[in-house]
Image (tube, rainbow, N blue to C red):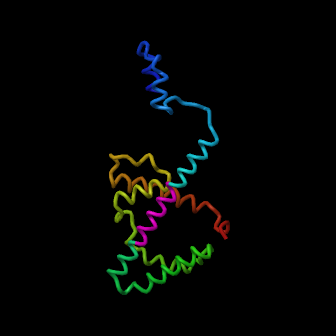
Amino acid sequence: MVPLFIIILIPFLELLMPVFIKLFPNMLPSTFKNETKEQEMARKRLKVKLEMAKFLQNTLEESVTVIKKNDTTRTSSVEEFVQFMKTIRNNAEMPETSQILKFCKLFEDDLTMDGLNRDQLIAICRLLDMSTLINPTSTVPLLRFRLGIKLRMLKADDKVLPTDQFR
């Protein structure tokens, strides 16, 4: 509304309105929605989410290799976890709670938000549709804080969902 207000206030600037619309196609609000454009935007969002998921998966695999190199006592359980993930991906079945709890111990301190760098935090923001946070001025503590809020909201939503819905 502010650019439109400026165009209206300055005399004869509305004659340049077609030029402004050509340069900034989404400048004017519109109720017109083209189904193909919406589908293309949905495809782009899905593609970005898949890329961010791949990035986070690569980060997880890198952290597993770091664990393998640094901690020889947990190497066998890390290898079990890798096999567990492969079987879940191949079979596409829900794992048992006992299996998940067994492998939760591997991720005690390695994947906390305090240990993630800015690129990883931005990837998580994009994955969770929090792209409004991503700008050059957003600091790492701000990203961690806002992600913490979002994760608490998601956790509260998960508590509301019935548990037998996913079985």
Q: Position of residue 84 (x, y in %)?
A: 53, 80
Q: Is residue 85 left or right of residue 76?
A: right
Please state which of residues 49 and 97 is positioned toward the viewer in this rendering.
Answer: 49
Instruction: Indicate whether residue 52 is drawn in magenta.
Output: yes
Q: Position of residue 145 (x, y in %)?
A: 39, 54
Q: Which residue is drawn at 67% across and 66% down?
A: 165
In depth, the one of 138 and 24 nearer the eye is: 24
Left or right, 130 with reference to 43: left
Q: Give the number of callouts.
A: 0
Region rendered in magenta: 48-61
Question: Magenta stretch containing residue 158, yes or no?
Answer: no
Q: How far across and how far down the image is residue 56, in percent? A: 44, 64
Residue 99 position by quadrant: bottom right
Residue sitting at x 33%, y 55%: 140
Q: Position of residue 76 (x, y in %)?
A: 43, 86
Q: In percent of the image, x 45 and y 48: which residue is there?
A: 131
Dominant secondary-structure state across the stretch colored magenta: helix
Picture quarter with the C terminus: bottom right
Q: Is residue 110 above or below residue 127?
A: below
Tell which of 79 and 107 is nearer to you: 79
